Each structure stands twice: as structure tokens, then as C-alpha cells.
């Protein structure tokens, strides 16, 4: 068998899917559309009636395409792939969040490092999402494009209408029910609380629970990687279904979307993160970038920040001079929960699909409330996403469900997901590296001779924060 990298297989899958879909499109679409319109509307119908019944007609057309051999195969394989992906989401979210939060160690250790790390994660992820939000509103990819998208008949359009509705969405009353209903926001809420309170029970009780969740997380990572191997076939089938009903025009519009994600990622990578580092430490961030380049490029080619973690740690310690005390705490946690690139990507991707969907479904409108929901969920989803290829896209169903977008439309995003995943993974790793270096500098845990050719240690300190020597002098 040819030993090719997965992303090549995925690209091949996309091309096959596009051809497969185009064949169905040419062979069936016009005839099936005419048949469906006659069945729904009779022989004499006006344009308005056709628009009003568009969804019903589309459902019927989809059913007709599925009834063919080629369409049935696309439907079957695509559904298996989507189901497998959905199958791992809940256990993966639960185990990754519980082990990530519990990995902080004791509640006391959460203290100083904890608040610094948490402020870095939250503030940089938020800045990333806002960068994406601004650019997606400026460039508006997908806006006003009349694509006859496959619209799921079961998808109900629900948009939060008040601040309370938005807030109440986060509070589960029954976590098991939430898991059974695939209510991921509730599962995430419960998992974080579980991790936090796990830190407060005695070590004897905590240790086996933590090992259990760590073990479960490793298993889920392996299972996810296995499912991702099926991606070329699953993606071919999903793309085929999509193109059968939309035609190849769908790919042209993706260029605007991919360009918006890439531009926003570049702003965050080259400007925002280095600027924060410089403001806090007054040192040249691009020297750190150069020292970290092997890890960044490995992240780019593997599209996995977890897989790159050992290399990131090694470069930070040996290339930048960061002490192990900081890297061992801040880095693994960051690799699990700090994903600026993923957060930014979630925001742009969902709003892009929403723009496209709004053009064909007048009942779906993008309100300010929807955008706020997307921003909040993008942050949460980036925390819950595993550091493996395509995790961000797998997790996107959460946001789709919350804002009322049919989850089949994630198929739109698969076409360009691999290159975008490579870019966002690099941003994720860069944010972890900048965060760890910044925190280490404020903690005087950097050997300044290694990268900055300075004999003295860093003197930068977060406002109101004690220096390491002061703490030591105080008889810590
Ligand atoms: N591949 C990304 C990472 O490993 C996660 C994602 O899919 O966004 O960081």
C-alpha cells in the first residue's frame, strides 16, 4: 500500500468527493428538482411558492439522491463518519477537561502560577476571537451568497433572545441527561466543576480518579486518531453529498473564508502575542520566535499541539532558557486548554457558515446575541478541544447546535480544514510558548544568558506580584 501522509489522503478524498458529487449533480439534480417541485407544488407554481417551499423541495431532492446507488453510498459513509466523530466528543470533552483541570495539582499550587496562566489563556484567546470577529465582519466571507445548501429538515432554528437565555444555557440540572442529549455546554460546565472540586478532596481519594480520567483521555485520543484515519473516505462522502446538491460553486466561496481565517491568525501570531510579550518583558519576542521555530514548524506539519508538546518544552528550556518549574506546569496545561488559533478559527468558521446559511434560510438571522454566543462558545470550545488534528472542527458541532445551524454544514469546512488546522495549531503552540516565557520572566525563572545574552536574570514583574527572591527571603 502507498504510505502517504494523512493530509494527502484527505486532499485526495476531497477531490474524489468533489468528482463524485459533481457526477451526481450532473446526472440527477435538474431532473430530481423538477420532479420534487411538481410533487410539492403541482404543475402551476409561482416563484414565491417555490421559495416558500424551498426547504420541502430540498428535502425531497435529497431523499431522491439518497435513493440512488451513488447517493446511498455517500449518505451511508458520510453518516458513519459523522456518527463516529460525534461518538467520541462527549467522553473526550469529559476526560480532557477533568484531567486538564486536575492536572493543575493541589488547590494551593493553583495560586500564583494559576492566576497568571489563567489570565494569559483567557486574555489571549479572547483577543484571538475578537480579531477573528472583526475580520469576519469586515470581509464577510459567505455573505449574500445564494448557495442552495442541503438544509436538514430536523434542524430547528433557535437563537438566544435575551442575556438570561444565554446565561441559563450554561447551567445543567442533570449531567447524565446532558451527556445523553449531546448537550455539550452542560457537559463542559460539569467537567470543569468536577476537575476543580477534584482538587479539593484528599490525595488518597483523588489519585485514582485523576489516573482514571488521564487514562480515559489517552484512550479517547487514540480512538479519535483512529477515526481521523477514516477521514479521507468520510470527507469524500460528505463532500459528494454537498456537491451533489450545490454544484462545485461551493469551493469558490471557501477562498474568502480561508483567507479571512489565515489573515486573522497572522495578525494574532505576528502582532498581538509578540506585543503582549514585549509590553510585559521588554524583550524582543521575535528572538523567541526564532528559537521556537522547530516546535512551531513541527506543529504546522503535524497539526497537533499535544503531539508537539515534548519539542515545545525542550525548545523553551534549551532555546529560550525557561526553567523547568514553569514549563512543567504552564505548558501541559496550556497545550490542553490554551488554543488561541482554534478559538479564532471557531469564530470565523461559524460566522462564515451562518452567513451562507442565512442567505438560503430567511428564518435564520444573525443577531448580536448570536455573535456573543459564538464568541463565548469559541472560547469554551477551544478549551475543550484536544490538541490533535481536526479537533477544532470536530468540536464545532457544539456551536452549530447552540446557534441553530444544521451540523451537516460542517461538511463545508472540511474542504479547507487541513491547511487551516496546520496554521491554527502553530498559533496554539506559539501562544503556549509566549505565555510560558512571559510567566517565567515575571517569575525570574529564565536563564537570560541563553537567548538574550544578558548576565542578569529578568527583572520584569507583574504589577503587585512578589519577586521570587522576596518570597524566598520571607521563608517560603
Ligand atoms: N489541531 C489543533 C491542535 O492540535 C486543534 C484544532 O483542531 O484546532 O492544536
Image: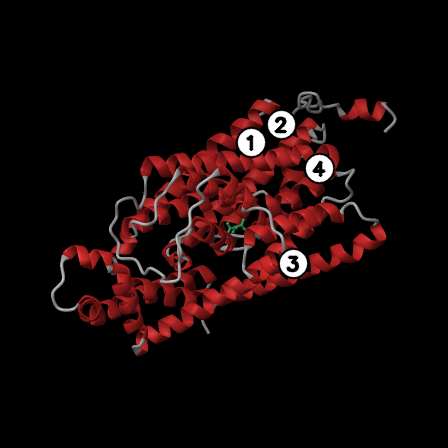
* Earlier residue among tags 4 and 3: 3
The picture quadrant where one finds residue 470 is top right
* Earlier residue among tags 1 and 4: 1
Residue 217 in view of the camera: yes
* Earlier residue among tags 3 and 1: 3
- Discs 2/4, front: 4
Residue ID for mark 4: 326
Is disc 1 placed on a helix, strand or loop? helix
Is the residue marked by circle 2 packed among few (<14), some (14-19), or many (20+) residues within 10 Å?
Answer: some
Residue 287: numbered disc: 1
Is disc 2 placed on a helix, strand or loop? loop
Residue ID for mark 2: 452
- Discs 3/2, front: 3
**Residue 171 in the image: x percent, y percent?**
60, 47
**Residue 359 in the image: x percent, y percent?**
28, 49
Q: Is residue 34 above or below residue 390?
A: below
Spatial distance from mark 3 to mark 1, Cα to Cα?
A: 35 Å
Asked whether, in this view, residue 363 is left or right of residue 334, the answer is left
Is disc 3 placed on a helix, strand or loop? helix
Is disc 4 placed on a helix, strand or loop? helix
Q: Are the residues tagged 1 and 2 within 8 Å (C-beta)? A: yes
**Residue 124 in the image: x percent, y percent?**
54, 34
Q: Is residue 259 above or below residue 232?
A: above
- Residue 442 vs residue 26, the one in the foreground: 26
Q: Are the residues tagged 3 and 2 within 8 Å (C-beta)? A: no
Amino acid at each position: 500500500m502507498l504510505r502517504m501522509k494523512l493530509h494527502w489522503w484527505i486532499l485526495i478524498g476531497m477531490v474524489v468527493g468533489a468528482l463524485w458529487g459533481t457526477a451526481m449533480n450532473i446526472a440527477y439534480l435538474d431532473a430530481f428538482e423538477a420532479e420534487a417541485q411538481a410533487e410539492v407544488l403541482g404543475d402551476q407554481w409561482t416563484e414565491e411558492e417555490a421559495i416558500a417551499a424551498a426547504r420541502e423541495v430540498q428535502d425531497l431532492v435529497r431523499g431522491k439522491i439518497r435513493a440512488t446507488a451513488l447517493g446511498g453510498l455517500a449518505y451511508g459513509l458520510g453518516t458513519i463518519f459523522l456518527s463516529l466523530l460525534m461518538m467520541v466528543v462527549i467522553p473526550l470533552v469529559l476526560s480532557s477537561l477533568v484531567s486538564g483541570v486536575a492536572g493543575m495539582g493541589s488547590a494551593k499550587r493553583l495560586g500564583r502560577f494559576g492566576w497568571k496562566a489563567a489570565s494569559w489563556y483567557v486574555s489571549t484567546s479572547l483577543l484571538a476571537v475578537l480579531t477573528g470577529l472583526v475580520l469576519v465582519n469586515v470581509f464577510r466571507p459567505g455573505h449574500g451568497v445564494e448557495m442552495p445548501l442541503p438544509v436538514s429538515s430536523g434542524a430547528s432554528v433557535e437563537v438566544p433572545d435575551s442575556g438570561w437565555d444565554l446565561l441559563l444555557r450554561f447551567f445543567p440540572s442533570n449531567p447524565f441527561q446532558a451527556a445523553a442529549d449531546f448537550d455539550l455546554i452542560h457537559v463542559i460546565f460539569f467537567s470543569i466543576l468536577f476537575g476543580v472540586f477534584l482538587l479539593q478532596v484528599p490525595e488518597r481519594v483523588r489519585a485514582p480518579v485523576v489516573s482514571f480520567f488521564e487514562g480515559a483521555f489517552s484512550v479517547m485520543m487514540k480512538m479519535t486518531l483512529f477515526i481521523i484515519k477514516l477521514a479521507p473516505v468520510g470527507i469524500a462522502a460528505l463532500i459528494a453529498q454537498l456537491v451533489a446538491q450545490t454544484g462545485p460553486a461551493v469551493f469558490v466561496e471557501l477562498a474568502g473564508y480561508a483567507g479571512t481565517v489565515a489573515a486573522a491568525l497572522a495578525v494574532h501570531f505576528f502582532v498581538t502575542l509578540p506585543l503582549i510579550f514585549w509590553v510585559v518583558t521588554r524583550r524582543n519576542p521575535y528572538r523567541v520566535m526564532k528559537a521556537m521555530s522547530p516546535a512551531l514548524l513541527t506543529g504546522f506539519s503535524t497539526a497537533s499541539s499535544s503531539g508537539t508538546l515534548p519539542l515545545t518544552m525542550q525548545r523553551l528550556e534549551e532555546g529560550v532558557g525557561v526553567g523547568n518549574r514553569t514549563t512543567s506546569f504552564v505548558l501541559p496545561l496550556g497545550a490542553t486548554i490554551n488554543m488561541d488559533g482554534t478559538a479564532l478559527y471557531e469564530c470565523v468558521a461559524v460566522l462564515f457558515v451562518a452567513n451562507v446559511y442565512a442567505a438560503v434560510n430567511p428564518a435564520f438571522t444573525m443577531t448580536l446575541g448570536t455573535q456573543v454566543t459564538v464568541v463565548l462558545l469559541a472560547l469554551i470550545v477551544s478549551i475543550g478541544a484536544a490538541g490533535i488534528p481536526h479537533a477544532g472542527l470536530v468540536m464545532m458541532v457544539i456551536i452549530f447546535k447552540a446557534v441553530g445551524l444544521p451540523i451537516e454544514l460542517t461538511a463545508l469546512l472540511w474542504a479547507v480544514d487541513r491547511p487551516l488546522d496546520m496554521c491554527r495549531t502553530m498559533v496554539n503552540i506559539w501562544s503556549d510558548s509566549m505565555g510560558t516565557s512571559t510567566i517565567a520572566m515575571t517569575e525570574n525563572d529564565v536563564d537570560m544568558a541563553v537567548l538574550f545574552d544578558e548576565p542578569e536574570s529578568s527583572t520584569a514583574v507583574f504589577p503587585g506580584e512578589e519577586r521570587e527572591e522576596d518570597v524566598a527571603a520571607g521563608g517560603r
